[in-house]
Image (cartoon, grey):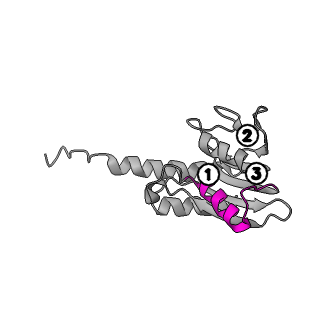
């Protein structure tokens, strides 16, 4: 998760929503790919950290099936990313902060544990959730502050 948090910090520095992800081998924990959100940079609605990390891991391995691998991400995956994890055959998902607006692993839906799908994975929520949430809060507070018009000064008119 530390690698994912570093990626999230990079995303924030680039003006992207600070979400980071890392794909790792289950047998030894070696990170094989890491990425962060790039939707604004790439003008791509699918450029979520999870999707980019899965693409990089699949390219590294030369196969799309990522059995024997896990993914750590700083924010609970959305429906697109949860579906990508299922389709990639990821065996383990670890995530930080829950997402009350789009989270489809535990919060709004349970797509990674859907019995009608052909693949399910072990899920561990809340890992370094406070650190993940703090990055998101700081990013959005700064954005809201940047868009507020300055308050008029009652002493200078």
- Quarter of image, res 20: bottom right
- As helix, strand or loop, the secondary structure at mark 2 comes to helix
Residue furthest to the right in view is: 27
Quadrant in which the N terminus is drawn:
bottom right
Task: Say which residue label 2 marks.
Answer: 112
Task: Say which residue label 1 marks.
Answer: 132
x then y, percent, for residue 111: 70, 36
Q: Residue at x 66, y 47 (%)?
A: 84
Image mark count: 3
**Closer to the N terminus: mark 2 or mark 3?**
3
Mark 1 to mark 3 CA distance (whole Å): 22 Å
**Residue 87 appears in the rendering:** yes
Say whether marks 1 and 2 touch (CB < 8 Å).
no
Residue 57, magenta (yes or no): yes
Task: Say which residue label 3 marks.
Answer: 90
Front residue (pair 147, 123): 123
Quadrant in which the C terminus is drawn:
top left
Mark 2 to mark 3 CA distance (whole Å): 10 Å
x then y, percent, for residue 33: 67, 65
Say whether marks 2 and 3 touch (CB < 8 Å).
no
Q: Residue at x 64, y 63 (%)?
A: 56
Instruction: Tell me which segment is drawn in magenta.
Output: 48-67
Determine the main secondary structure of the stretch shown in magenta. helix
Front residue (pair 12, 104): 104
**Closer to the N terminus: mark 1 or mark 2?**
2
Q: Is residue 105 above or below residue 75?
A: above
């Amino acid at each position: 998760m530390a690698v994912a948090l570093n990626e999230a910090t990079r995303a924030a520095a680039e003006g992207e929503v600070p979400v980071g992800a890392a794909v790792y081998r289950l047998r030894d924990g070696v990170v094989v790919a890491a990425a962060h959100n790039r939707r604004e940079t790439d003008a791509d609605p699918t450029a979520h950290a999870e999707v980019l990390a899965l693409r990089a891991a699949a390219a590294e391995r030369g196969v799309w099936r990522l059995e024997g691998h896990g993914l750590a991400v700083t924010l609970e995956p959305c429906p697109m990313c949860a579906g990508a994890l299922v389709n990639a055959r990821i065996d383990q998902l670890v995530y930080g902060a829950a997402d009350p607006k789009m989270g489809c692993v535990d919060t709004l839906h349970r797509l990674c544990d859907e019995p009608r799908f052909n693949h399910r994975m072990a899920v561990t929520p809340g890992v370094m959730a406070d650190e993940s949430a703090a990055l998101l809060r700081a990013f959005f507070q700064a954005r809201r502050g940047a868009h507020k018009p300055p308050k008029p000064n009652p002493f200078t008119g």
